[in-house]
Amino acid sequence: MTLHPSLQNYADAATHSIEAISELVKPLAEGEWNRRTPCPWWSVRDIVSHVIGMECEMLGDPRPIHTLPRDLYHVQSDFARYMEMQVDVRRHHTAPEMTSELEYVLIRRARHLRNESRAPETTVRAPLGAEQTLEVAYNMRAFDLWVHEQDLRAALGQPGNLDSPGALITRDVLLTALPKVVAKDAGAPPNSAVVLDVHGPVEFLRTVRVDAEGRGSIDGSPSLGPAVTLSMDWETYVRLACGRVRHTAVADRIKAEGDQELATAILDHFAVTP
C-alpha cells in the first residue's frame, strides 16, 4: 500500500467500522432495515444508504440526480439536503440491493486504498461544493463511520467496538469542539475552567480553560477549583455530543459538580454534529 503514514490510522479505523457495518446488516431480514436508529429521522436502511453514498463520493463518483420529496420536514438546511440526497435515492431499495451495493463499495474501497498515493494536504471535494484536505476527509470518514456503526448497533441490539480505532478518532474529533461549547455557546465566564471526566471503554480527563478575553482552549491537565466538573461514561458522552439524546433523558448517567446553571448551559449545547 502507498498510503501516506499520516492517513493510515484514519484508513484503518474507517475500514474497521465499515466492515463491521457490513457484517451487522448482512443477515437482516427485509423488515429489519426499517428499524429506527438513534440518528434522528434515519432508519437502518437510511444509515447504510448514507454510508454507501459518502463512500461513493470519496471514490469520485458523481452525485445522483434526484429530487427530494417535499414532505421531508426534517430537512431544514442545505447541509441536511445534501446528505439526504444519497439516502432518499435508496429508500425503496431491497435488502439484497443494499447489501450488494455495500459489498461492492467495500471492494472498490480496498482497491482505492491500495492505490492511494496522494499527499495528505491534497485538496479534495467536500460537501456543498467546498474543499478540504485529504487528511481532513479521511479523518471525518473514520469519525462518521464509527458513529453510524454505533447507531446501527443500538438499533439492532448488538453493542460492541466502543474502544475500537474509530472510537479514539471520534474522541479527538468531538473534543476539538468542546472549547466553543463551553466558552461561546454556554458563556462560561472569563478566567474559568470546566473539567470533563469520562470513564468506561475510552477514558480521559480534559480541562477547557476560558481566558480573560473569553476564548476557550483545551488540555489534559487537571484544574484546581473548576467552575464545573462533568462526569459521565464514554457511551453517554458520545450520544450527547453527537445529538443522539438530550441530557435530560440521561440525567442519571451524568454527574455535574459546581455551578449548576453553567453545567446546564453546557449540556444544553453539548451536541456538536450537524
Image (tube, grey):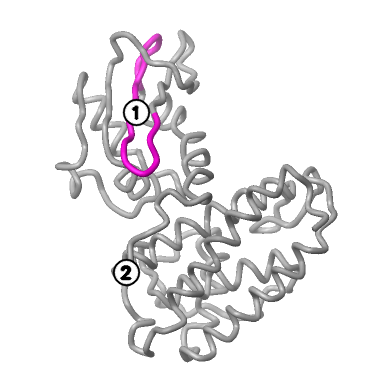
Q: Please say if 208 is above or below 59.
A: above
The quarter of the picture where the N terminus appears is bottom right
Amino acid under label 1?
Answer: Leu
Query: Which residue is drawn at the image coordinates 76% and 67% (left, top)?
Result: 112
The residue tagged with tag 1: helix, strand or loop?
Answer: strand
Side (left or right) of 165 relative to 228:
right
Q: Where is residue 45? Give x, y as percent.
A: 44, 78
Q: Which span is picked out in magenta?
A: 188-204
**Foreground pick, 265 / 199:** 199
- Residue beneath label 1, please? 196
Q: Where is residue 249? Give x, y as percent.
A: 18, 49
The residue tagged with tag 2: helix, strand or loop?
Answer: helix
Q: Mark 1 and 2 residues: CB-CB less than 8 Å, in contact?
A: no
- Residue beneath label 2, please? 155
Q: Where is residue 64? Give x, y as percent.
A: 65, 78
Q: Where is residue 52? Give x, y as percent.
A: 58, 73
